[in-house]
Amino acid sequence: MNQTNKVQNPETPINKTPEINDRDIINDLLTTEKYMTASYNVVLNEASNEDLYQDLLQIFNETQNMQRRLYNLMFKNGWYSIEKADPQKISQAAQQYSGYKNQFPVH
């Protein structure tokens, strides 16, 4: 990734040893929460019982919120970087998807 396209906070120093550190633990938690969120999403799409659906939706929301908090913590500490959005790519995607809406039936 090109450094000029990278968005990242200054990195919080950690011991770079073979031993597990705070960044490793939080990264593992974030990866787990991402997996859980994706899995709950599938279950929500297929739940046929309304009470079960509502319970799962609450758990999904809690999981999604935890994922976001972990992401924010990683980003704040400079342990997670993102790529700046290219305005031209955004424009191209917007045009592409606006063309798709003409394919959907109007209600």
Image: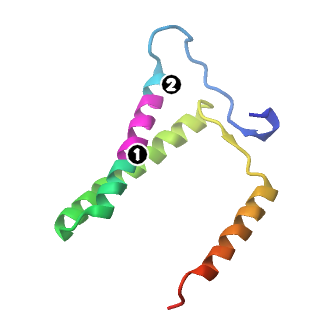
Count residues near mark 1 (Cα–Cα under 10 Å), then give few for <14, some for 14-19, many for 20+: some
In x, y percent, where is residue 62? Answer: 34, 52
Coloration mode: rainbow
Q: Residue at x 19, y 62 (%)?
A: 52
> Above or below — where is 47 with respect to 39?
below
Q: Earlier in the sequence, mark 2 or mark 1?
A: 2
Span of residues in magenta: 26-37
Please tell me whether mark 1 sits on a helix, a strand or a loop: helix
Task: Judge left or right: residue 48 versus residue 102.
Answer: left
Question: What is the x, y in percent for residue 86?
Answer: 78, 52
Q: Is residue 96 left or right of residue 60?
A: right
Q: Which residue is mark 1?
A: 66
Q: Are marks 2 and 1 in contact (CB under 8 Å)?
A: no
Which residue is rendered at x = 61% and y = 19% of the image? 13
Decide: is 81 above or below 17: below
* Percent coordinates x, y for residue 61 in the rendering: 36, 56
Q: In the structure shown, which secondary structural element does the residue marked by tag 2 occupy?
A: helix
The dominant secondary structure in magenta is helix
Between residue 105 and residue 57, name the one nearer to us: 105
Residue drawn where x is 48% and y is 47% of the image: 68
- Please identify the quarter of the rendering in which residue 79 is found: top right
**Residue 102 at x, y = what percent?**
63, 82
Q: CA distance from mark 2 to mark 1?
A: 16 Å
Q: Nearer the viewer, residue 100 or 34?
A: 100
Q: Does residue 76 appear to the left or right of 96 in the view shown?
A: left
Q: Quadrant of residue 8?
A: top right
The amino acid marked with disc number 1 is: Met
Where does label 2 land, which residue?
Answer: 23
Q: Is residue 48 magenta?
A: no
Q: Is residue 29 above or below residue 98?
A: above
